[in-house]
Amino acid sequence: MITTNKAPSVHLHTFIADLMAVFPNSAYYKRGTFELKKICAMASERGFTDMMVINENKKTANGVVLIHLPGGPTAHFKAFHLVTLKSLRAESLCSYLALFWPRMSSIMHARLTINQS
């Protein structure tokens, strides 16, 4: 289950759409005015095993809280310089991904480097 802070921006919704593409069985629920404890209880009642809360500051996502339901553990990750898939062009995607995995030795990395040249 994916949820946000109480008043998400439009930019955060595009980031959530990218996350839902990465995690195939995920579902987005608007937080509204509910407290996080009530949302955790509702998520565990509906059969979710994990919950992801996306935080933002000044219309940019700056943190992700992962909660394993029903009792924890909880992990917090900070996010810097997020780029959504919508803002990338198709031709620059391969070179952009190569920045993240310069020393990765896998079949996917080989395909990316072949497509670049």
Image (tube, rainbow, N blue to C red):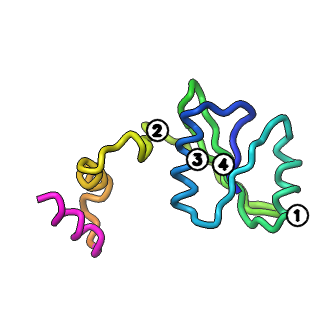
State whether residue 82 is above or below residue 97.
Answer: above
Name the amino acid type tagged 3: Ile
Name the amino acid type tagged 1: Glu
**What is the CA distance from the residue labelled 2 to the residue labelled 4?**
14 Å
Badge 3 element? helix
92 horizontally vs 70: left or right? left
Q: Nearer the viewer, mark 3 or mark 2?
A: 3
The answer to whether the residue labelled 1 contacts the one labelled 4, judged by CB atoms less than 8 Å apart, is: no
Snapshot quadrant of residue 70: bottom right
Q: Quadrant of the C terminus?
A: bottom left
Q: How many other residues sit within 10 Å of disc 4, few (<14), some (14-19) or many (≥20)?
A: some
- Residue at x-position 58% and y-position 47%: 16
Badge 4 element? strand
- Residue at x-position 30% and y-position 59%: 101
The residue to which callout 3 is attached is 16
Badge 2 element? loop
19 horizontally vs 113: left or right? right
Q: Main secondary structure of the magenta part?
A: helix
Name the amino acid type tagged 4: Val
Sequence-wise, the earlier of marks 1 and 4 is 1
Sequence-wise, the earlier of marks 3 and 1 is 3
Percent across and percent down for residue 116 are 16, 58
The residue to which callout 2 is attached is 80
The residue to which callout 1 is attached is 45
State whether residue 113 is above or below residue 87.
Answer: below
Part of the protein shown in magenta: 106-117
**What is the CA distance from the residue labelled 3 to the residue labelled 2?**
16 Å
Determine which of the numbered discs, if any, sits on residue 65 in the image. 4
Q: How many other residues sit within 10 Å of disc 3, few (<14), some (14-19) or many (≥20)?
A: many
Sequence-wise, the earlier of marks 3 and 4 is 3
The answer to whether the residue labelled 1 contacts the one labelled 2, judged by CB atoms less than 8 Å apart, is: no
- Residue at x-position 25% and y-position 58%: 102
